[in-house]
Image (cartoon, grey):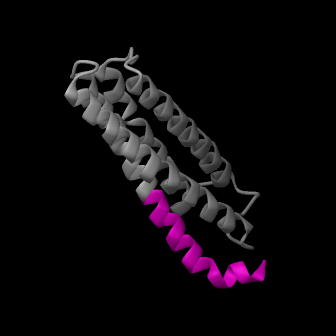
Amino acid sequence: MTFLGVLYPWVKAFHVISLIAWMAGLFYLPRLFVYHCGVAPGSQESERFKIMERRLFKQIITPAMFATLFFGILLMLTPGVVLWNQGWWYVKLASLVLLFGFHGASSKWRKNFLNDRNTKTHRFYRFANEVPTVLMMIIVIMVIVKPF
């Protein structure tokens, strides 16, 4: 895998770019849900939110997640990038698993809105909007600071 060492700066750059796109979408989607809660199911506004949520999720968030995963796996395979005996890596990995879980939950919430079956309040989505931020902060600190 020595060719990965040569490509390392490019792989890292594309990993960060795709992560930024993924996170931007995960920050915005719950905000759309907050606003979607304020309109009547089946209304013209609701239908507009459904289109916006679908496009954001299917055209930006999910492709960016897969790109982040792809470039992250390449980084893991690059010799010397991950120090497997250090704890920061495992905290980052656990946070990433939670971020994938949030992605899945967002998909479920989107489908509930799509079928006019949302049962959650705008307050729930306001709180949910903070989850990707906290996870991103943990991940970035683990990768940059490597506290343990």
Residue at position x 75%, y 59% in the image:
84
Q: Where residue 52 sits in the image (x, y, percent)?
A: 31, 41
91, above or below 15, in the image: above
Q: Main secondary structure of the magenta part?
A: helix
Camera-side residue of 138 and 78: 78
- Give the left or right position of residue 87, taking residue 35 as reference: right
On the question of residue 146 being in view, the answer is no
Residue 57, position as x, y percentages in the image: 43, 44
The residue positioned 51% from the left and 54% from the top of the image is 63
Q: Is residue 103 above or below residue 92?
A: above
Q: Give the magenta range.
A: 1-20
Quadrant in which the N terminus is drawn: bottom right
Q: Is residue 110 above or below residue 85?
A: above
x then y, percent, for residue 90: 67, 48
Residue 81, quarter of picture: bottom right
Tell whether 48 sits left or right of 134.
left
Looking at the picture, tell me which residue is in the foreground, 40 or 148: 40
Viewed as shown, does residue 36 lie left or right of 75? left
Q: Is residue 7 magenta?
A: yes
Residue depicted at 33% across the width and 34% down the height: 50
Picture quarter with the C terminus: bottom right
Q: How many marks?
A: 0
**At x 55% / y 71%, what residue is drawn?**
12
Q: Is residue 92 magenta?
A: no
Using the image as rendered, state which of residue 50 and residue 91 is in the foreground: 50
Q: Position of residue 38 (x, y in %)?
A: 21, 22
Q: Residue lying at the far top in this picture: please name it.
A: 119
Is any part of residue 33 visible from this angle?
yes
